[in-house]
Image (cartoon, rainbow, N blue to C red):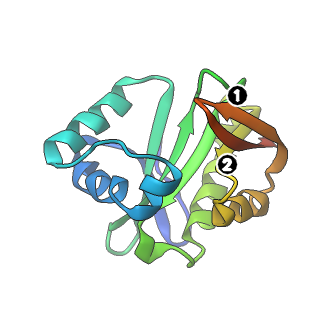
Amino acid sequence: MMPILTSRFSIDPLTLNDAPFILELLNTPGWKKFIGERNVNDLPDAIAYVQKIMDNPSVSYFVVRVHNSKTAVGVLTVIKREYLPFHDTGFAFLPEYNGKGYAYEAASALLKDPEIQAAHPKMLATCLKDNVRSIRLLEKLGMVFDKEIINDGENLLLFSLKLDA
């Protein structure tokens, strides 16, 4: 997949070179609270985590980088989860980059990408009820609340968006 470009970002597939960034991101309070503990505690753990993602054909991670500095600021995901009929998209950004419109700009570009649209007629998203910022972002992206679901004992809100191919 070619990089997706926005006015501020390059959105590229995850590589092993991103392991230090992934280590930092997975250990932020927001990731641990809203996504979950991944037990990625050092660089070897992060390298193994990234390799596992890259080896899984059901999982795609994209790193959002600021154009001028190439600084990694967040990730976007497209994942086929066993408990969902369509792929699920997600996003996570380092705390210092929250509230700047970065997640909206990057996620919107991903959902409008012709390759993504051709491969996915519909995109889903799940989040915890108390993740108010993510709910607002999903709605701003045009996603519509469908229903509450339970997965692994966790109550999740399910959103969907029909993609234009």
Q: Which residue is mark 1?
A: 86
Which of discs 1 and 2 lies nearer the camera? The answer is 1
Residue 66 image-quadrant placement: bottom left
Local crowd at mark 2 within 10 Å, few (<14), some, or many (≥20)?
Answer: many
| Residue 6 seen anywhere in this rendered image of the structure | yes
Q: Measured from the top left, where is residue 164 in percent x and y? A: 81, 41
| Residue 165 seen anywhere in this rendered image of the structure | no
Q: Measured from the top left, where is residue 146 in percent x and y? A: 85, 41
Q: Alpha carbon of mark 1 to alpha carbon of mark 2: how far?
A: 14 Å
Q: Is residue 70 left or right of residue 32?
A: left
Q: Measured from the top left, where is residue 37 in percent x and y? A: 38, 46
Residue at 66% across, 58% down: 108
Residue 100 image-quadrant placement: bottom right
Q: Amino acid at mark 1?
A: Phe
Q: N-terminal of the two: label 1 or label 2?
A: 1
- Residue 111 disc label: 2
Residue 69 image-quadrant placement: bottom left
Local crowd at mark 1 within 10 Å, few (<14), some, or many (≥20)?
Answer: some
Residue at 53% across, 53% down: 34
